[in-house]
Image (cartoon, grey):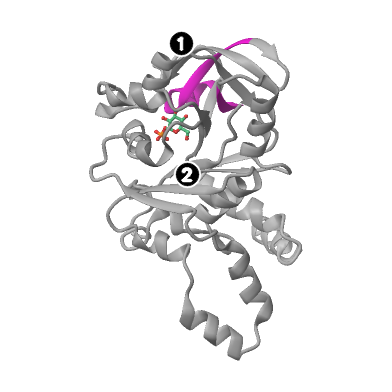
Amino acid sequence: MKKIRKAVLPVAGLGTRFLPATKAIPKEMLPVVDRPLIQHVVDEAREAGIEHFIFVTGRNKAVIEDHFDRQYELEVTLTERRRFADLEHLERDLPVPGQTSFTRQQSPLGLGHAVWCARDIIGEEPFALLLPDVLVQAERGCLGQMMDAYREINEPANVIAVEEMAPERLHEYGVVGAGRTVGKAFEITSMVEKPARGKAPSSLIITGRYILQPEIFQFLETQSWGMGGEIQLTDAMIRLALSQPFYGVKFEGRAFDCGSKIGFLVANIAYALARPDIGPKLRKNLEEILRE
Ligand code: G1P
């Protein structure tokens, strides 16, 4: 079975839900504690063994490219000030030269279209897809857990991370139907993007982490407009599922929908509380605020 080496990270969204913060800064650069959202997602992919990162960008996203590059003035200043620990951290986060790609989605035509923009860079390999709106806090990263399940399945299959969601929120997500359990995964029997209220096949939503076979691009190529007048990835997956298996993985950990203000704020608190350097102090401060 082919190793999964490449990951697609769609970062072309406008981030209108975070205006005015995102007027001049991409939402993917908003910090969760002291690392940009996108860096957390790259960390998760790296931990899972991903070697090449493909960013599908759009207008006003150039700073994402800069973030994954050297910053010489900063390095010189940090060296002069003997801030070697900071320098080392920056060095550790740098991607390997030649193992990032940036391609543009010129028009916001939907997630399916964004993924399709990466087809030439992916080629004929299975690949990972991580939506940077979603952060998963877990001992072993979400994509890593999916890779374990994928290796266990040991056939060219598609794997999707899923989580339980309250019935009143199912219509905001892609939802899967669940079949037979296979090791750490289960067979997906159906998928629907943003089901009408009461029409979801289960309470398991698609979390924003995928392992996909390259055949998905054939379906994205001819995919017609779906929900919200956009090219939907889920619609192309439904067609691919007629000829290839799809498995769901209920990952261990907690997912934060950082595309919403509440999700983003709660992610900041949860990630900060987990940090030994600031967690205890933050907890004390939060307790004080909550008592008032
Ligand atoms: C996308 C997917 C959806 C998935 C969600 C996870 O929707 O289309 O299936 O459940 O991400 O965040 P979006 O959030 O782009 O509307």
Query: Which secondary structure, mark 1?
Result: loop
Front-lying residue, 182 or 49: 49
Q: Residue at x 30, y 58 (%)?
A: 60
Q: Is residue 165 visible?
A: no
Mark 2 vs ligand 1: CB under 8 Å? yes
Give residue 189's position: percent from left, percent from top. 53, 10
In the depicted structure, whether residue 289 falls above or below residue 128: below
Which residue type carries mark 2? Answer: Asp
Residue neighbourhood size for the residue with mark 1, other residues' Cα within 10 Å, grouped as few (<14), some (14–19), many (≥20): few
Residue 243 has which mark?
A: 1
Mark 1 against mark 2, which lies toward the viewer? Answer: 1
Query: Which secondary structure, mark 2?
Result: loop
Check disc 2 and report the residue beneath it.
133
Q: Quadrant of residue 62?
A: bottom left
Q: Is residue 111 visible?
A: yes
Magenta range is 158-179
In the depicted structure, whether residue 139 falls above or below residue 268: above
